[in-house]
Amino acid sequence: MEYEDQVQHVPNPKYDCLLFDVDDTLYPLKSGLSAECTKNIIEYMINKLGMEEDKAPEMCVQLYKDYGTTMAGLKAIGYDFDYDDYHSFVHGQLPYEILKPDPIFKKILQSLPIRKVIFSNANKEHIANVLGRLGLEDCFEGVVCFETLNPLNKTDIPDAKAALELNGSKSSTIRSTVTDFINDSCETNAEFPKTPIVCKPFEDAFELALKIAKINPQRTLFFDDSIRNLQTAKLMGLHTVWVGHSNLTKGVDYALESIHNIKEALPELCEAIEKIEDIHFLEKVAIETSA
């Protein structure tokens, strides 16, 4: 009997899909890759968008907090730029070589006979580079990424154009918007301008990802390093794992300091697989001794 057929005899498996974020989830935060990415974003804001050097770092953080990604926030407050140009600048200079192959995690993934899907705000080229460096490029059934959630690569966003027309020239509009936005962000009930970009941690991104990947949230375990993403996922019915942390909090079912501890969140499945492997081993021994 084939191994895949044996897995079908696992009684009522709790999950039929594992959904993974990429950055700071499949590899640790201490690698420094995300810090390099943030540096590149700030550099893009200064050199490509003309933002004042002393305001860019604070704005980068604030937009990330309020919009899920700095990119989404920049679009929301009126900056006009090409998505591919942004991704090329921010990710094109990353030192991917700091990521090393992870044969341990690869073996773990390959031992789990259920669907495994990527769900990231990053663009597909960045995800491919990360997976390639980690040696995990063949471990996932599919990828839901920036291009998946935002299929039409349009730079003429109606909301952004309207904002520019209302406030005058592009340069004065941006400076005014940045200042106003920082001030508004300090107010609890501030209403932020909308972004045309679909991304985590917002519900529309999860709804679209689940639909595209044909995922049943009640039977899916979602791994992410962002508590905001996990809390939204929990509201959407997903089971959640906080990677890079050891303490449980609201919206989190499991907390793992390392993705290598993934089996701690899959005790029932792993126990069943171990039993199947024991049976498979005994059947092999019986065949060999009777031959």
Image (cartoon, grey):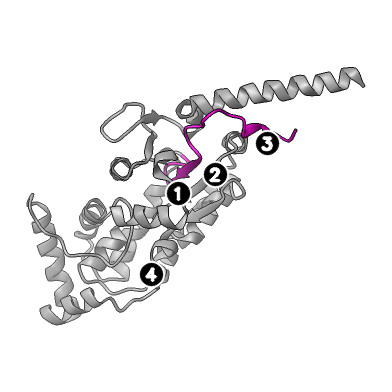
Q: CA distance from mark 3 to mark 2?
A: 15 Å
Please name which of the two marks, 3 or 2, marks the residue nearer to the observer: 3
Closer mark to the observer between disc 2 and disc 4: 2
Relative horizontal placement of residue 31, taking residue 62 as reference (left or right): right
> Residue 143, position in %: x, y?
50, 55
**Res 5 label:** 3
Q: Position of residue 155 (x, y in %)?
A: 33, 76
Rounded to the nearest whole Å, what is the CA distance between mark 3 and mark 4? 44 Å
Q: Main secondary structure of the magenta part?
A: loop
User: Residue 175, position in %: x, y?
Assistant: 15, 70
Q: Which amino acid, mark 2?
A: Arg
The 10 Å Cα crowd at callout 3, few under 14, some 14 to 19, many 20 or more, is few
Real-space Cα separation, disc 3 to disc 1, in angstroms: 22 Å
Residue type of the residue flagged with mark 1: Ile
Residue highlighted by disc 2: 115
Q: With 258 as the anchor, is 9 left or right in this view? A: right
The reply to whether the C-beta atoms of the residues labelled 2 and 1 are less than 8 Å apart is yes
Query: What span is in magenta?
Result: 1-27
| Marked residue nearer the N-terminal end (2 or 4) | 4
Which callout, 4 or 1, points at the residue further toward the start of the chain?
4
Q: Which circle marks residue 215 in the picture?
A: 1
**Cα–Cα span, label 4 and label 1:** 27 Å
Per the image, label 1 sits on a secondary structure element best described as: loop
Q: Earlier in the sequence, mark 3 or mark 2?
A: 3
